[in-house]
Amino acid sequence: MTRNQKRAVRKISLAALLWVAVPLLARAQSKGNNAVYSGTSSVTGSSAYIDATAYANTSTTICATLYNIMSSTSPAYPTPGAVIDARGLNSSNSNLTCATNTSPWTLSPGTEYISKPARILLPAGKIVISYPWVIPDYTKIVGAGASTSSGAAGATTIQAASSFNGGLGGPMIQMGGQLTITVSGNPETVGCAVCFEISMTDLTLDGQSQNIDGVDNSNAEELSTLQRVAILNTEGNGVLLSTVASGPSNGTASHSGPYQDLYISAGTSASSGTTCVKVYNAQPRGIHGLTCSAGSTTAPHAGIYLDGGNVSLENLTISGFADGVLIGSETPLMNANGLQDIYADVLSNVTGSTNMTNLVHICNPSSVNGNCTSTGFTGTEDIAMASLTGGSSINTIRDDLTGSIVTDTIVALYDLGEPVQASGSNVASSYSRFTTSPSTPVPTWLVGTAVNPTNGSCSTVDNGSLYSRGISGGSGSTLWGCVSGKWIVIK
Amino acid sequence: MKTTGTPGILSTSAAILLVLGSLSLRPVQLHAQAAGNNAVFGSSSACTSGGCIASTAFIDASILSGSDLCAKINTALTSGYPAAGAVIDARGIGSGTTQSCAGTPWGTSTHPSTILLPSGTIQISSTWALPNGTRIVGTGPGQTIIQATSNIGTIIEMGSSASNEISIEDLTLDGEGYSLNGIANSYAQELSYVRNVNLYRIAGTGLLVSGSAQNSGPYTDIVFNSDADAATTTVCAQISGVSTRGIHGLTCISGNSSGSYPGTAILLDASNNSLEDIQVQGFLNGILVGKDAAAQNDVLLNISGNGTLTNVVHICGSTPTPCPSTPYTVTSLTLVGIATGGGTNNSIKDDLTKTTLTDPTVALYVLGKSVTVGAATGYSRFTTSVNTTTWGVGTSAPSTGCATSTTGSLFSNTSTSSGTALYVCNGTSWAAIK
């Protein structure tokens, strides 16, 4: 090879090296960017999302990795937020057990808390936490899927470590809220009092039978929700939707939701206070789709505490609780948002089981029964219920306001309106009400083809029930009333 | 040398290029943990040697072995598949084309997974039976189309034994006019659902939920369009013998011409279900309640026709055809917001109380339980329709007669100036009660 030939080879080699290397080097990108082809043989970084794998380390927990991404200054985490794809984190490249007193938003509670918008995709598998996740404004947590069992393959499980939160209780997940931290020796309030767009979807929470809550929301409002979430073995509240009890924050879960397609199983360690959902002094958009169960020997008081107004509960299946839905049992709360009342609630397609006392129990603090209290809500009214299915030997409806117990296994409609006559020393309160239940002690209105039931027995319906002849003909009478066991002509 | 040397130089250069060219790809391959892993930038330097790492966020099935889409997905499921489960991204396999599957993506695999399907048409010749924990997601109805190439019985079965967490989203199932089922769920329970799915050219049953599918659903945002392939027995959806979280958002369209409409769009043969936001056109009956099994305590909300149906909602009793001559137990139904959509058809036909309502819209019709009254059967019932027995309220005494069909209706006069406050319709006029 001549000198010129060698020189030519060197030139070609150098050109080739540059041809190969320059496109890549020229497109140096941020850590965690996705590699996409920008040409036939070169790749460039896309900031469509941040893959947390690039930040992973076997000695770093998944919480710390997420924290490091959101708190990063080089490369700087985008101010408007980003999608953080943590689905590639696993036990081979990460520690999936978060350290004590850490979460993706703090590694040092009391001195720091980051609040940056994000959509975080969590991996399939089990993530163990020992400190509540206080989710900031505009944060969406998306799992790989929910499951009815903890740690199931193909699903994301967030499991509370034993002695969660140092045994102090509290929720595994808190949707928003304010915290006071100390920065440079000075107290500083961080987080959001009135929060928006906080959501969790497609994952499972496992409380490991501790007396803790699954998800608490007293601050997150519009566009905040849970969807396809399973909550297992939390022996406090599975989901608590309430209002901040004190202080000027005005925090509330009102306008959040709907909370959809939930599976909450309190397990065999449920205590008397264990519940699937508690709505307290708030008006969320409802619970739509819930299977709620407890397997303890002694049934907890209630599957759902309904102590708020304008709430819709739809498509629920409840088992293992003394009361399926308990309305108005808690002590009302006067706070910055004013006094909340219970009104205009809608229950639709609610199914119980044989091992409960009442499927729906409406409390009257003046006439306490079962799990109701004398300090509970007064003034409960306008409760509409359609399609309630109890079980054998249970009360489908116990309405302490009207003193009615409906034992029909199925009830198409029970609408309780408003008081029309106040109760007094010798006068029971009365309400506008209509129900399709024909069983005592709730009068109803029947329509039929019997042309003349006069003096016929009406012992299967309650005194005061009406019967309209729905066809022409007969004796000329068209309306009867049930009086002392017989149909008496009214007109 | 000069003439012979040039090729040597070129070949040497080519070799260098080849090596360097392969190096340009090596960074992606160097740290790949498994085929199909995604490449991401590991540092700010770039995807050069050592700077590009593999992410197991998902498995891209496009580079896996397999003779077709389903085979490649099966490779992902059966070769080094993570025990914790994974997302299998198959969107890069023949995207936008028509492609066939010789088998199913699962074969004998039962691993839970989330499978992202490509756009285009996927032709299948055997039923896809989704294992426990399987979620399939298309790119959208009309974009991802799973098409049956023959009458395979059912296009997709949600589980083949008791299971949970099975879902189908964002795709079209094309029955090619065969008398088959689109989606059948007899096994999948909690956290199992169908969302945003188009059921197209299915001459059998579009969505069949039965057996042990309790607590499944909701089945939301579904469009059934048989096109011109509907038979008289074509059914848009059927819930049979099982309580679910309901069907919420469903459009049922038969492309048949009048005179050959299928009998029923939705067969509700089960208890404790909610049907909401449903629109039906091109069937004789919109929702037929209690034809093949008992139906109690169901809620129907916002149901409308388009003026072509004979009955928007038909409650079976002892009147046969299409109902059985020996009726099943049908009680406790709540109907809210029923509309004919025009025409002269019936909004509600209730065989139990012998009531047929032609009102274009009915706000509320609640049928309770039966009670023996005299020699006949009465029902607790309340409706806002003024064309049957109801309860009216006004501020003056009724000034006209009442129709025979409203016999037994009550009327309350809220005016205190009139001596009578309560009336009953005796079939021709309002008779004062008190």
Image: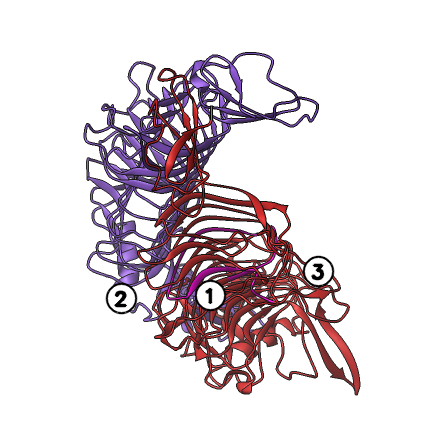
Regarding residue B242, the answer to whether it shows in the image is yes
The disc at residue A441 is none
Q: Amino acid at mark 2?
A: Ser
The disc at residue A302 is 1
Q: Quadrant of residue B388?
A: top left
**A91 relative to A373 in the view: left or right:** left
Q: Position of residue A165 (x, y in %)?
A: 55, 83
Q: Quadrant of residue A334?
A: bottom right
User: Would you say the residues marked 1 and 3 are in contact, meaning their CB atoms lie under 8 Å apart?
Assistant: no
Per the image, label 3 sits on a secondary structure element best described as: strand
Same chain shared by disc 2 and disc 3:
no
In three-dimensional space, the C-alpha distance between marks 2 and 3, rounded to whole angstroms, equals 60 Å
Badge 1: how crowded within 10 Å, few (<14), some, or many (20+)?
Answer: many
Q: Which residue is mark 2?
A: B79
Chain that the image shows in red: A
- Chain for numbered disc 1: A
Q: Amino acid at mark 3?
A: Leu
In three-dimensional space, the C-alpha distance between marks 1 and 3, rounded to whole angstroms, equals 23 Å
Per the image, label 2 sits on a secondary structure element best described as: loop
- Chain for numbered disc 2: B
Q: Which residue is mark 3?
A: A339
- Chain for numbered disc 3: A
Q: Position of residue A233 (x, y in %)?
A: 42, 73
Per the image, label 1 sits on a secondary structure element best described as: strand
Chain that the image shows in purple: B
Q: Amino acid at mark 1?
A: Ala
Regarding residue A4, the answer to whether it shows in the image is no
Q: Write down the region rendered in magenta.
A: A305-330
